[in-house]
Amino acid sequence: MSPIDNLAPNAKRIWSYAIDDLVISVLFIAIFFDQLTQLTTPESATMFVKTNYWILALLKVIYHTLFTWQNGKTLGKQLMKIKAVNITDGTLLTLPMAFVRALIRILDESFFYIGFLPAFFSPTRQTLHDRISRSVVVNA
């Protein structure tokens, strides 16, 4: 059976994304809790975001790369019973494929989620990061 025969619905992918962002946000807050509690003005909050954006992006890349590489599933995908696999043979992504997928995903987010739009119009439901990493998201 081809991976394309078992594509995950976009609704499951959206829920998975939300869960993963929540997990990463909690981790980020835990790491920077002391600093966050000391923010008292909008200016200090803006400076904090500017200073620590790259740490948040790095956390996301590490999280998505490692979990996708290990078993095709982040926590969100696990809960939604979906996984990312190689489009050609349905195997797990290699470490470089998982890294590229995670990196492009961050770029997609940074540019108003534009790279996510193709999933709604593509018969394979692939986002830009899926296409570049030669992956699809399927029901687990």
Image: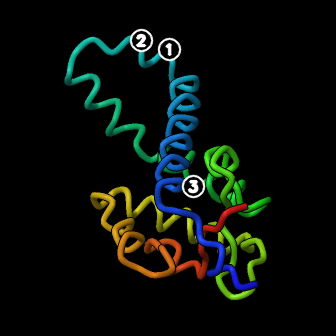
Marked residue nearer the N-terminal end (2 or 3):
2
Residue 98 drawn at (x, y percent): 65, 68
Is 28 located above or below residue 10 in the figure? above
Residue 129 drawn at (x, y percent): 49, 71
Location of residue 108 by image quarter = bottom left
Q: CA distance from mark 2 to mark 1?
A: 5 Å
Residue 53 relative to residue 34: left or right: left
Residue 135 drawn at (x, y percent): 61, 76
Residue 10 drawn at (x, y percent): 47, 61
Which secondary structure, mark 2?
A: helix
Which secondary structure, mark 1?
A: helix
Q: Which residue is mark 1?
A: 34
Residue at left 48%, top 43%? 18
What amino acid is labelled 1 in the image? Answer: Asp
Give me the disc on residue 61: 3
Q: Are marks 2 and 1 in contact (CB under 8 Å)?
A: yes
Of marks 3 and 1, the one in the foreground: 3
Q: CA distance from mark 2 to mark 3?
A: 26 Å
Residue at left 26%, top 22%? 44
Q: CA distance from mark 3 to mark 1?
A: 24 Å
Which secondary structure, mark 3?
A: helix
Is 84 located above or below residue 73 in the figure? below
Would you call the spot at circle 2 few (<14 residues within 10 Å), some (14-19), or many (20 or more)? few
Q: Which residue is mark 2?
A: 37
- Residue nearer the viewer, 23 or 96: 23
What amino acid is labelled 3 in the image? Answer: Val
Q: Where does the C terminus fall, quadrant-wise?
A: bottom right
